Image (cartoon, coloured by chain):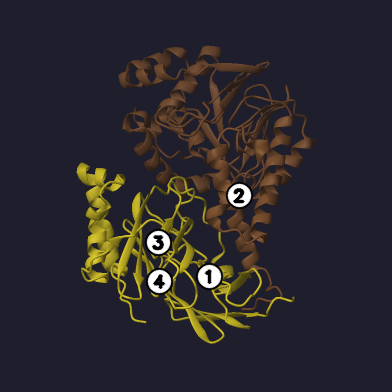
Amino acid sequence: MNITLPNRGLKGLAQRTAVLLAALFVSTAQAQLKSPDNPEASPNWQKVKASLFKGRSIAAAPVGMLELEAPQRAADAAVVPVAMRTHLAAGDSRYVKRLTLVIDSNPSVVAAVFEFTPGNGNAEIETRVRIDEYTHVRAIAELSDGQLFMSTRFIKASGGCSAPAGKDPAEALANLGKMRLRVDGEWRPGQPLLAQVMINHPNHSGMALNQLTRHVTPVHFVRQVNVSYAGKPVMAAELDFSISENPNLRFRFVPRGPGELKVEVLDSQERRFESALVLAPAAS
Amino acid sequence: MPVTRSSRSTPQPFTRRGLLLAAAGLPWASTVWAQTPVQALEVEEGVYMLQGLTGELTSANLGRIGNAGFIVGRQGVMAIDTGTSFLHGQALLAAIAQVTPRPVRQVLLTQARQEFIFGAAAYQARGIEVHMQRSAAALMAARCETCLKTLRAELGEEAMRGTVVPKPDVLFDNTHVLDTIGRPVLVSHHGLANGPGSASALDTRTGTLFAGGLLENRRIPDVQDGDMAQWRQAISALRTLNIETIVPGHGKVGGREVAVGNDRYLAQLEARCAALLKAGTALSAVPDAAELPEFSRWDQYDNIHRRNASVVFLRLERQQLLAPAEQGARS
C-alpha cells in the first residue's frame, strides 16, 4: 500500500499559519471559515483534492451509501468521535476499497486513510479525532471500480478552557503501544463482527505546548495499523496526529472460520507493537 | 483602566465614592453594568451571596454565570470569587459597596475557572489581596490565557476590556483560618477534588460554606478538571465541619442537601459510564446512552452532563487499557 499523505510536518505547519493569519486579519476569510457554506470552496480541500485524488471527479454520495457521523458541536475538541459507514446495494459486485477522512482546518488535513479487503461486508470505521477549529470534515469512499464518493459535515469544536495535562511522561512511555482488542458478539459463519482496537499512545502532534514544562512535545504518533484475521488482511489504516491520543478504531469484519485477529502497529519513531486475539466458534 | 503594580502597592480602602469616580472614568462600562446589575443577597447574618445567572456562557449573559459572595466582619470584608471579567469584578465590588462601607481586605479565588477568576484585576486595582491555592494558581497560569482569548472572541472586546489572567498576591498550600476582618473564616484546601487546588471558605460563626467548584446546586458539576474519587472524598469530609448553609459555585443557596445531591450525581455518572464501557459502547453513543433522568432538570444537563459522560468514559477506558491484560487479550 503506497499512499502519500500531503501536508505533513513543516508544510502542514506553514499552511496552518497561513490559514490562521487569514482568519485573524481578513474578515471575509474568517466568515468563510466559521460558516458551513460552500464546502467545495475550502482552500485546504482544493489542495488535498489535487494532490491525493489527482483531480479525479468525486461525486456526492447518494443517500445511505456513505454516512459520515460526527457530533455537530464537539464536547471535547481533543476527542471527537467520527464514524464512516458505507452501504452498497445487495448484488453490487463492487466493494469499498478505501475510506479517506479529511479535516479541512486541521494542521494535518488528511487524518486517516483506511484500506479494506473484499468479503468483509460493508466497510465501516469509527475513530476519534482532534479538531482544531470550526471545520468541514469529509469522508471519501473509493470503490473497487475506482469511483469516488464523498460525504461532508461541518463541525464546531474549539479548545476553550482545556483540561490540565496531568500525565506522567515516564509512565506513558512505559505503557507505550500497549493494546486492547475486543470483539463483540459470537463468531458465526458469514456474520460480521464488531472489532475494537485500542492503542495506548500519546499521538503527539508536535504542536502542543506542555502546560507545565512550557516545551513543545515532539511529534510522535501512530502512523500505521494493520489488521489481519487468520493470516489474511482485513483492514489497514494509515493515520496521523489528527487522530486523538490513545488511537481507537472500531470496524467490522467477517471471520471465515476460527482464527486469530492480529493487529500490528507502527509509530512515527519506527516502533512496532503487536497484539492478537483468538476467536473460537460460539459454543452451541 | 490599567492595572499597575503601583496602584496595588498602595492599598486604598474601597469606598463607594472611589467606585463612582472609577465609573465616571469608564463611560463604556456603565452600559454593561446597567444590563446586569448585581444584587447582594444576605444568606446569613453578615454573609452575602452575589448570585450568577443560569445557563451556559453566552454574550447575552456576558458569561456572568458563577456565584460570588462576601463576609462582612467588624474590621472589613472578605470576598469570595471575582466574576468573569474586569467589569464583572467591578460590578461585584459595587454590590458589596451597596451593603457596607467597610474595606474589602482580601478575595479568595476558589478554582481556576473563568467565571470565578477574571474579575480579580478589579479587586487588585483597589489594593485587595487575591488569595489562591498554589495548584489552582498553577493551572490558571498554564491555561487561562487561552480561556481569556476564547472569552474575548465570544463576549467581545468591550465586555472583556481590562481583563487579564490574575496573578494572586498570596499563594497558600493548606487549610488555614483567616482572621483579618474580625470574624474567623476557615479557608479549606480540598486537594484535587473538582479541580487542582480546590478551595472553599467557611464562615464559622454562621456555618455558611462558600463551596466554590466543590458543590453545585441543581446544576451539573463539571468533571473535566477533577478526580471523581477524591472529589467524593472531599464532599464526604465536609461532614466533619459545622455547615448550615451552602453557597454553591453555581445555582441557589441551599442547605446540606446540596452536598448530597452532588455526591449522588458523581456516583451515578461514574456507575453509568463504567456500565457503558463494559458493554463496549462507542464513544459517539456515550452522551445519549448516559442519560440520568434524576438530574435531567439540573442546569446544563444537555451540555455539561453529555461532556462529563464522555470525559468519564474516556478515563475509565484509559484505566482499563493500562490495567493488566485480561483473559483473551494479550499484547
- Disc 1 is placed on an element classified as strand
Q: Are marks 2 and 4 on the same chain?
A: no
Please tell me which of labels 1 and 3 falls first in the chain.
Answer: 3
> Chain in brown?
B
Chain to which mark 3 belongs: A
In the rendering, at what x and y percent does residue B221 appear? 61, 39
Q: Amino acid at mark 3?
A: Met
Have a look at marks 3 and 2 and say if they share a chain: no
Q: Which residue bears the numbered disc 2?
A: B289
- Vertically, is A126 above or below A118? above
- Chain at tag 4: A
> How busy is the neighbourhood of tag 2: few (under 14 within 10 Å), some, or many (20 plus)?
some
User: Looking at the rendering, in which quadrant would you find the C terminus of chain A?
Assistant: bottom right
Q: Is residue A215 visible?
A: yes
Marks 4/1: CA–CA distance:
19 Å
**Residue A228 sits above or below residue B78 on the image:** below
Q: SS for tag 2?
A: helix
Question: Circle 3 — which element?
Answer: loop
Residue at the disc numbered 4: A92
